[in-house]
Amino acid sequence: MILVFLGPPGAGKGTQAKMLSEELGFKHISTGDMLREAVKNATPLGLKAKEYMDRGDLVPDDLVIAMVEQVVLKEKKVILDGFPRTIAQATSLDSMLKKHGREVNKVILFEIDDEVIVDRLTGRRICPNCGAVYHLKFSPPKEDQICDICGTKLIQRQDDTEEVIRRRLEVYRRQTAELIDFYKRQNKLISLDAQKSIEELYKDLKKAVEDEY
């Protein structure tokens, strides 16, 4: 089974994918994490991607596809989180999967208001040492701006500033509107209310996935 998760940054796709992976054995492929790792390691692909990510723009198709294709073909149960984002990517994905007798089974759309996203992401802080994630409002560290685990000073990711978030949302809305229609026409789209609690949202997600088995 191959699932595609659609939704703006901050909609909770990563959290839900992790829960589904742990319970049902899916391989979670987050292109965002893959790209950030490439940036961190200063690979040629990562350096190219960094220019786009720092502006809040989408990374070009050829860079993303180069990272995703081989991984998809190795796994039986996959969640694609952050890919595809455009009609061109979706078409390329369909063509590639068809060669191997596979297809995207369901597309989960996480729907959420922009202002909720801005509130979620601007308050997010991460530990540059151990990778722990906090939120100044919803899950703050015990000591202000200090990691509970290793005592390192927390940082705000460059793409979590309000200016970049709003730019990312603008790009998301503009470029994925056609993609949503694309999967609607294939009768594969399921919309979920991502403003629900994590637990309530997961119940809805799990039901949508299990209905496909």
Image (tube, rainbow, N blue to C red):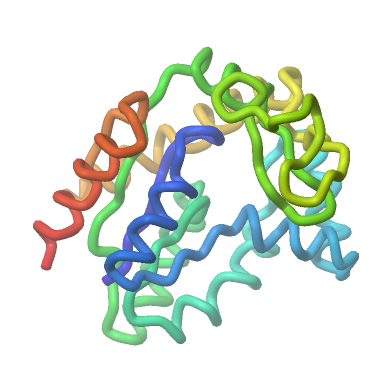
Q: Is residue 167 above or below residue 86?
A: above
Closest to the observer, 96 or 118:
118
Q: Is residue 212 left or right of residue 160?
A: left
Q: Position of residue 152 (x, y in %)?
A: 86, 44
Q: Position of residue 112 (x, y in %)?
A: 40, 24
Closest to the observer, 202 or 212:
202
Q: Is residue 110 above or below residue 99?
A: above
Q: Quadrant of the N terminus?
A: bottom left
Q: Is residue 67 left or right of residue 114?
A: right
Residue at 30% in and 46% down = 108
**Total number of numbered labels?**
0
Q: Is residue 146 above or below residue 152?
A: above
Closest to the observer, 129 or 88:
129
Q: Position of residue 106 (x, y in %)?
A: 25, 56
Q: Is residue 161 left or right of residue 51?
A: left
Q: Quadrant of residue 197?
A: top left
Residue at 33% in and 81% down = 76
Residue at 56% in and 70% down = 68
Closest to the observer, 162 or 18:
18
Q: Is residue 116 above or below residue 176?
A: above
